[in-house]
């Protein structure tokens, strides 16, 4: 196919393709460097001791990697429980946010009803509310309904994620033809079944994208969880990192802090690599074509 | 008659599918939001452990915010830093997106490149800032490189120059979010029916033509999404400048954003002024998003 | 007798009368001494008369921001059994550690909320002990949420071995002591011996002290150090020294007042920064830390005993500390830095246990000696510090074998903190941040002060700025 393009474009374009390809590779390599560089320093810093770290930047690794890991593992912070907590909250948040946002978007996309446009505008407006303000009211609320110190207070609200909804709606606009739904109806598929078995699979790339985003932002969220979770057994990794950083002088150890950061990035990378298959691996929308 | 009732029967599902969102929204966002707006009409804060108010003060909080005149400054700062970060971000994302979806380029290792670009977003903003502090310290590596190259005569204080602080904030935001944007665009591009590209190629369209005539127009809904969410994210810009300037927005508050300003009032649990400020933010965001939405939609017609 | 009954009620019951009770006993002292705070004798008489009710609580809730106190209790409190990382047992009482890291002010926010709910909280959820730091101690101490030591039956005699300044930090506006610390963090000037030899021709602590004995001499020395290619230190290092020696509170009659010693810090620092004798680095940053190595060319740091091991990278090959290259002297003015205070929460249902924890951890000399040796805290006991000062146990390797305890003890005696206010934390932080703009030439002094006032107005809406 590409060869065909070259033939059509003629020899003159052949050179420009080479030039463009060269520029593309150059930029991509630069971008790759800029992206991976941070992970390299995080790793380097995780191999350095506290006093080495206090002397500023060094580009080469040191020898304290296992020492930092042992100190962290055998320290007083429940890092493995923290990881499980983070994982449970992030997975459920991502799941709820994507599933129900797709459902909400589908409601607006596929049906005609009186409040449709009003609802759409309304949800867009919600998106503009800065979380920092409502968080105070939010805390009062969860205190009143007995969800303080309960991870559910962080998970359940994900059902209403306006930004995820907006993306799903926009994605449906560009890729989900109503004729397909019509066809399903003619085949006798129920509405709920159509949504779960026909629409959801078609939305895979969009769902994967938003699942990653929701997962990552939940995983890295410090602000709200720190205000909601109080028991050590319920705390998530970012809270534990903050706790490690505010340790008293006998225990303060930046080496452990960096090790902890590295430790908490590791699972997100894994999750990302698994989900990114759907985005970068060339998954296409077979259904739309037909 | 029969057909109409059938349509109605289907359309009630529109409401049914909306139920979970609406219920959760009403409980977890509407109640806090209502209390925020309600509070904006009261004097309500904490002095130490003493609760002052709530005393009804009408529009006093709004008057206070308008009369001290700082809001436009912080709005300007926020927009400057957002634009400084967003323009390179969207250009880079479009460029990468176009390259990745351009079949004539036949780029190798695509999966690797596509995977790598999102990675910086996995790092927590606070961890990122720690690394930036180390790199851009007066005695840090960036300064020693600049010194060795003879670009500067003595260590440049990145954190005490208006434009270098704004530049660092924009750089960090751009780094953290360009992968995100690229992925959004790519997912949109992948959603485009591949037969369209094939047909265009058969007709002899160049890569540029395909990009401008097919990819961009079909990408419009996603582009609007990227523009609006990024604008909203920009107006809500907080963690990066907050951590990088230790909450001060220095030098002389030239990098203080709207939400950082709001955050200052949360220290004293100032629900009154904070509430009024968020109403302002809400209005600003609303107007800007409307402008973007109308602007991008009208071009289509 | 009536007063005694009131205090008993105050501790035993958990109703509104408790707060009224504290209020009325304050009122009583107001009657006898008008606006004057209650005298020590009165308070002691009151304390001696206190009979604590039986402990009824099954849970001892302790609110802290890190694990320091937990490890001190675990290691040194007799009868404490560790259950897991946040739970322990003392006899039949379950000890619960509520740890909230202080990032974004989270510890205080959480504590505020919990204290405000204390009245309605169930018995097992009531706070029994909470810890505070000096910068914001008065915010809690000057309220009825913290019990006076005398209400627990702790007399000034029990606390006689402590340093005065550690008590003035937690004394409320009626003269009642409301907290107790096991640490005494008097601080001084930690100088680079090599630099001192080069600049002053000597590294003898007494002679170096003479060269920095007051701010005029200090500034002269700084000028000499700058000539020799050294930076004296950061303006943020000296700030604490100036701000500990003010003649008035930050907030007077509801108005922010910039003390003349603080103003002197601004002018001295600006001159030193302009002549490159000092820099403006933020504490703990990479630039600030460079002085730990000879190549950093920093003349001195300002710090207390905990600073030695915590901040000087002694185990790092090639650092000044590693070669024992630091010296310690008292510096231009006495000051302190750091420390943790234990407060008893009003409404505790374990008053006897709380009393015992406070007495054991902050007054038991054997325990304090142990803490000094095992945990390197500079402890709040004149006796223990005197012992350390007179024996080789007090020699510190990274100070080239110098024994700093005599100076530390003398410093602790001299610290005068009669001018603290509950606004100190916010005012000090915001003032330093705002002035950095002036030092670096991004603003005039007036503009920087205006910036400071703006920040204060945001942080403390109840305070007037000019």
Image (tube, rainbow, N blue to C red):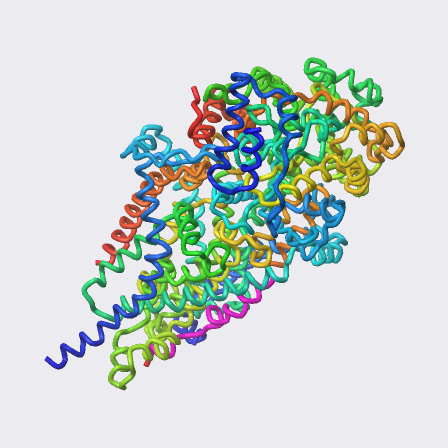
Tell me the residue at 56%/62% (across/down): A85
Tell me the residue at 47%/71% (across/down): A278
Indicate the position of residue C20 as horizontal and vertical percent values: 48, 33
- Of helix, strand and loop, which mostly describes the magenta segment? helix
Q: Is residue A287 magenta?
A: yes
Above or below — where is C179 with respect to B230? above
Depth order, front residue of A64/B19: B19
Above or below — where is A207 with respect to C314? below
Above or below — where is A27 with respect to B268? below
Task: Specify whether B251 is left or right of B74.
Answer: right
In the picture as drawn, the residue positioned furthest to the left comes out as B1
Q: Is residue C151 magenta?
A: no
Count of numbered badges drawn on the protein: 0
Tell me the residue at 15%/77% (across/down): B5
Residue C289 in view in this figure: yes
Depth order, front residue of B173/A230: A230
In the picture as drawn, the residue positioned furthest to the top comes out as C216
Indicate the position of residue B138 as horizontal and vertical percent values: 63, 36
Give the residues drawn in magenta, as a range: A266-289
Depth order, front residue of A87/C298: A87
Indicate the position of residue C373 as horizontal and vertical percent values: 81, 39
């Amino acid at each position: 196919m590409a060869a065909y393009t070259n033939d059509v474009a003629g020899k003159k374009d052949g050179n420009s393709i080479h030039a463009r390809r060269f520029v593309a590779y150059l930029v991509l390599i630069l971008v790759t460097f800029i992206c991976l560089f941070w992970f390299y320093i995080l790793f380097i810093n995780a191999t350095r001791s506290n006093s080495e770290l206090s002397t500023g930047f060094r580009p080469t690794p040191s020898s304290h990697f296992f020492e930092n890991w042992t100190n962290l593992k055998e320290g007083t912070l429940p890092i493995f429980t923290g990881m499980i907590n983070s994982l449970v909250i992030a997975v459920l948040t991502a799941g709820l946010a994507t599933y129900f946002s797709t459902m909400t978007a589908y409601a607006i996309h596929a049906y005609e009803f009186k409040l449709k446009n009003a609802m759409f505008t309304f949800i867009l407006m919600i998106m503009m509310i800065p979380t920092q303000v409502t968080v105070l009211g939010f805390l009062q609320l969860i205190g009143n309904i007995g969800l303080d110190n309960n991870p559910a207070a962080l998970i359940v609200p994900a059902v209403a994620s306006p930004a995820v909804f907006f993306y799903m709606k926009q994605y449906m606009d560009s890729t989900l033809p109503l004729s397909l739904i019509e066809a399903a109806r003619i085949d006798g598929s129920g509405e709920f079944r159509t949504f779960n078995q026909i629409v959801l699979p078609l939305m895979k790339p969009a769902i994967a994208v938003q699942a990653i985003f929701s997962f990552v932002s939940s995983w890295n969220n410090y602000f709200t969880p720190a205000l909601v979770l109080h028991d050590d057994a319920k705390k998530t990794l970012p809270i534990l990192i903050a706790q490690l950083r505010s340790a008293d002088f006998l225990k303060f150890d930046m080496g452990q802090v960096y090790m902890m950061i590295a430790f908490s990035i590791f699972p997100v990378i894994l999750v990302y690599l698994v989900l990114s298959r759907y985005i970068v691996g060339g998954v296409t929308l077979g259904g739309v074509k037909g | 008659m029969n057909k109409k009732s059938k349509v109605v029967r289907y359309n009630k599902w529109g409401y049914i599918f909306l139920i979970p969102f609406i219920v959760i929204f009403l409980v977890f966002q509407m109640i806090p939001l209502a209390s925020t707006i309600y509070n904006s009409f009261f004097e309500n804060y904490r002095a130490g452990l003493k609760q002052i108010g709530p005393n009804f003060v009408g529009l006093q909080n709004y008057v206070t915010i308008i009369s001290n005149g700082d809001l436009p400054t912080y709005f300007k700062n926020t927009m400057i830093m957002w634009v400084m970060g967003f323009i390179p971000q969207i250009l880079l994302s479009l460029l990468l997106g176009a390259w990745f979806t351009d079949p004539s380029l036949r780029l190798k290792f695509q999966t690797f490149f596509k995977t790598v670009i999102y990675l910086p977003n996995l790092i927590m903003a606070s961890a990122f800032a720690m690394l930036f502090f180390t790199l851009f310290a007066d005695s840090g590596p960036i300064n020693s490189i600049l010194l060795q190259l003879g670009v500067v005569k003595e260590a440049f204080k990145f954190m005490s120059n208006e434009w270098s602080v704004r530049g660092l904030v924009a750089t960090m935001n751009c780094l953290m979010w360009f992968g995100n944007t690229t992925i959004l665009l790519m997912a949109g591009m992948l959603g485009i029916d591949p037969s369209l590209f094939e047909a265009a190629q058969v007709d002899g369209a160049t890569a540029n033509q395909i990009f401008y005539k097919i990819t961009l127009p079909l990408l419009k809904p996603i582009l609007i999404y990227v523009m609006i969410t990024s604008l909203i994210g920009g107006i809500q810009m907080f963690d990066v400048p907050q951590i990088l300037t230790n909450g001060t927005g220095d030098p002389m508050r030239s990098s203080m954003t709207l939400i950082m300003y709001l955050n200052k009032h949360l220290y004293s649990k100032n629900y009154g002024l904070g509430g009024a400020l968020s109403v302002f933010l809400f209005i600003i965001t609303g107007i800007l998003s409307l402008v973007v939405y109308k602007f991008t939609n009208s071009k289509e017609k | 007798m009536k007063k005694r009954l009131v205090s008993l009620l105050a501790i035993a019951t958990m109703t509104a009368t408790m707060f009224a009770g504290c209020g009325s006993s304050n009122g009583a002292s107001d009657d006898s001494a008008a606006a004057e705070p209650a005298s020590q004798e009165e308070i002691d008489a009151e304390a001696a008369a206190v009979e604590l009710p039986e402990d009824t609580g099954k849970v001892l809730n302790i609110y802290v921001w890190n694990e320091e106190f937990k490890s001190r209790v675990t290691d040194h409190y007799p009868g404490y059994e560790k259950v897991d990382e946040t739970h322990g047992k003392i006899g039949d009482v379950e000890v619960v550690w509520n740890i909230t890291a202080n990032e974004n002010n989270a510890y205080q926010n959480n504590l505020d909320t919990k204290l405000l709910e204390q009245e309605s909280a169930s018995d097992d959820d009531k706070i029994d002990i909470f810890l505070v730091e000096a910068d914001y101690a008065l915010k809690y101490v000057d309220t009825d949420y913290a019990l006076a030591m005398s209400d627990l039956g702790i007399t000034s005699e029990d606390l006689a071995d402590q340093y005065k300044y550690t008590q003035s930090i937690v004394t409320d506006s009626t003269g009642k002591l409301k907290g107790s610390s096991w640490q005494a963090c008097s601080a001084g000037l930690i100088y680079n011996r090599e630099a001192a030899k080069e600049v002053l021709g000597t590294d003898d602590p007494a002679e170096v002290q003479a060269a920095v004995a007051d701010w005029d001499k200090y500034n002269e020395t700084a000028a000499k150090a700058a000539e020799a290619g050294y930076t004296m230190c950061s303006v943020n290092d000296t700030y604490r020294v100036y701000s500990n020696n003010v003649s008035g509170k930050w907030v007077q009659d509801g108005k922010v007042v910039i003390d003349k010693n603080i103003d002197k810090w601004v002018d001295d620092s600006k001159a030193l920064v302009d002549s490159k004798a000092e820099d403006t680095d933020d504490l703990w940053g990479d630039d600030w830390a460079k002085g730990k190595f000879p190549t950093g060319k920093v003349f001195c740091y300002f710090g207390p005993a905990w600073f030695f091991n915590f901040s000087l990278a002694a185990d790092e090959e090639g650092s000044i500390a590693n070669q024992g290259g630091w010296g310690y002297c008292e510096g231009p003015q006495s000051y302190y830095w750091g420390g943790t205070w234990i407060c008893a929460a009003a409404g505790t249902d374990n008053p006897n246990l709380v009393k015992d924890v406070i007495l054991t951890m902050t007054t038991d000399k054997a325990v304090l000696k142990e803490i000094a040796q095992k945990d390197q805290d500079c402890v709040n006991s004149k006796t223990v510090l005197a012992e350390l000062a007179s024996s080789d146990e007090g020699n510190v390797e990274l100070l080239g074998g110098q024994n700093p305890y005599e100076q530390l003890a003398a410093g602790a005696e001299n610290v005068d903190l009669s001018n603290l206010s509950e606004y100190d934390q916010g005012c000090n932080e915001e003032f330093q941040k705002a002035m950095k703009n002036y030092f670096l030439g991004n603003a005039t002094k007036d503009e920087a002060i205006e910036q400071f006032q703006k920040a204060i107005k945001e942080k403390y809406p109840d305070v007037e700025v000019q």
